[in-house]
Image (cartoon, coloured by chain):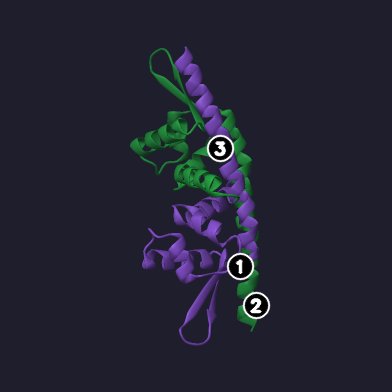
Chain colours: A green, B purple
Amino acid sequence: MKDVVSDCSIESVMRVLSGRWPTLLLYYLKDGTKRFNELRRDNPTVSHRMLALELRKLAAAGIVRRIDHDGYPRRVDYELTEAGLRLVPLIDALGDWWEEVEVERKRAAGVRHAA
Amino acid sequence: MKDVVSDCSIESVMRVLSGRWPTLLLYYLKDGTKRFNELRRDNPTVSHRMLALELRKLAAAGIVRRIDHDGYPRRVDYELTEAGLRLVPLIDALGDWWEEVEVERKRAAGVRHAA
């Protein structure tokens, strides 16, 4: 964390990634293109409206690309952009960090128990 | 993003880091110990109660350490733990990623304008 400018970009990125769905959608899209309905099946607790809103937010941020296919029935696919693919390892690193800290937390709790 | 286990840890880490204050507090604590009142001065728009809650959440997650000094007037300091210090470059990487994407977004908007 270097200066106020980079701090602002951290605020912006946290605004986009905050909440449950952005990182889950990143996870479900990391292996390739998915249809809207497949994403709904992957996330059965998300409403149609919420999923559409989250995908629109990720598209506006340049993380997800929406592909409208011609024809009937209408078909809409979503995939990660290049920027979205570059984001995946950064989020993975946060998950790895969390798992390390979890181990340390448990060790600390064990020490307190033993004392 | 490897499997469902690491996906769960990503959900957990996003739950802790979501919102405006966690990453801002990380930023303000990265250079060393600060008193509660100094953190309030750094973040004049945060209420006393909200700051206390956010710091407690970060302490429970093992990111921040609270130091209670004896004596009067009572003095409480906060500092990043080892785990918190290791988190700083990961959040920095997200900020750098955002700035790169911003450049790409602007370039894409310029292309659309020129077309």
Choose top left, top right, bottom left or bottom right for residue A6: top right
Whole-percent x, y for residue A82 in the image: 59, 29
Disc 2 marks which amino acid?
Val
Whole-percent x, y for residue A95 in the image: 60, 51
Q: Secondary structure at mark 3?
A: helix
Tag 2, which chain?
A
- Relative to A73, is A30 on the left or the right? right
| Gap between marks 3 and 2 measured at Cα | 42 Å
Choose top left, top right, bottom left or bottom right for residue A56: top left
The reply to whether callout 3 and callout 2 are in contact (CB within 8 Å) is no
Tag 1, which chain?
A
Tag 3, which chain?
B
Circles 3 and 2 on the same subunit: no
Answer above or below: position of A22 versus B39: above
| Gap between marks 2 and 1 measured at Cα | 10 Å
Disc 3 marks which amino acid?
Glu
State the mark number for residue A105. 1
Residue named by callout 3: B99
Whole-percent x, y for residue A30 in the image: 58, 35
Q: Which quadrant, please, contains the N terminus of chain B?
A: top right
Q: Nearer the viewer, residue B100 or A57?
A: B100
Nearer the observer, disc 3 or disc 2?
A: 3
Q: Residue furthest left?
A: A49
Q: Residue furthest bottom?
A: B71
Does residue A57 appear in this view? Answer: yes
Disc 1 marks which amino acid?
Arg
Residue named by callout 2: A111
Answer above or below: position of A100 versus B56: above
